[in-house]
Amino acid sequence: MKARVFYRTLLGFGIGYLFLPVFIVVAFSFNDLKGRRNVSWEGFTLRHWAEPFKLPGLSEAVLNSLTIAFLSALISTVIGTLIALALVRYRFKGRATTNLLLFLPMASPEVVMGSALLTLFIVAQVGRGYMTVLLAHILFNLSYAVVTVRARIVGFDRHLEEAAMDLYANEWQTFRRVTLPMILPGVLAAFMLAFALSFDDFVITNFNSGSLQTFPVFVYGATKRGVPPQVNVLGTMIFGVMVIATTIFLVVQARRQKMDEAALAAGD
């Protein structure tokens, strides 16, 4: 009994420590600040929520972050899914080397990767801006997408595909109607992870953005003069959307698992 209380208390402290910065962001989005620095509680207000894009350039920075995050997550997830299928299903020369190389972007410090990409773009005489940031985000998201989808494919039963092809389904029909629905949770998880990593990235983006401003770059510049409450408002909105999306994903997965278990029980 005492051990259970101890572990629950320890878990509570861990969760509280993990979410303390989030609680502060949410609380100070309602702060009725009197000056520039949003670091002390002055009172409750909703006026910042009524004008979340009041700061010049903020709406453009958020739009840049959203579009780059979506495109980089989509492209890296599609390519990563194909790479994961090839690595799990086939044996080819250089497969072990490919596995090793895929982990290098995740193991490399962001400062090193950002400076290396900057050097590459300068040598290639590519102007820094939207496209360089998008290419950089696809590069570091690709490894996470491959690892996430691969974990799902490893536990996939190939006999389901063989049964579909025995019923005269071709390769594309088998992939679209059998393989993809089965690995879809891993694909969606890879997309969500890539989207979050891309939207949140500052170091690599700052190296390769040029004059382009994304939301993290805008926040970095804004905090030099204080922490605008609009930043906390948008941070709270983004956090809320991600929590809702994750909850929906988990609920759908739980229901689907129950339906599969019920179907297996009925078959038995």
Image (tube, rainbow, N blue to C red):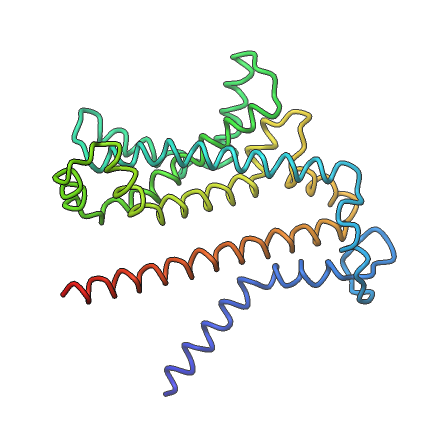
Expressed as whole percent of the image width and height from the top left, the position of residue 95 reads 22, 29
Expressed as whole percent of the image width and height from the top left, the position of residue 28 reads 73, 60
Residue at the extreme right: 34
Instruction: Using the rendered view, name the quadrant where residue 63 is placed.
Output: top right
Left/right of residue 133 with respect to residue 150 in the rendered view: right
Q: Nearer the viewer, residue 21 or 151?
A: 151
Q: Nearer the viewer, residue 133 or 79?
A: 79
Expressed as whole percent of the image width and height from the top left, the position of residue 19 reads 56, 63
Left/right of residue 243 with respect to residue 143 in the rendered view: right
Q: Look at the picture and state if 156 lies above or below 12.
A: above
Expressed as whole percent of the image width and height from the top left, the position of residue 97 reads 25, 29
Q: How many marks?
A: 0
Q: Split into 4 quadrants, where in the image is the C terminus? A: bottom left
Instruction: Using the rendered view, name the quadrant where residue 3 is placed.
Output: bottom left
Give me the residue at 31% from left, 46% from top.
181
Q: Split into 4 quadrants, where in the image is the N terminus? A: bottom left
Left/right of residue 80 with respect to residue 199 in the rendered view: left
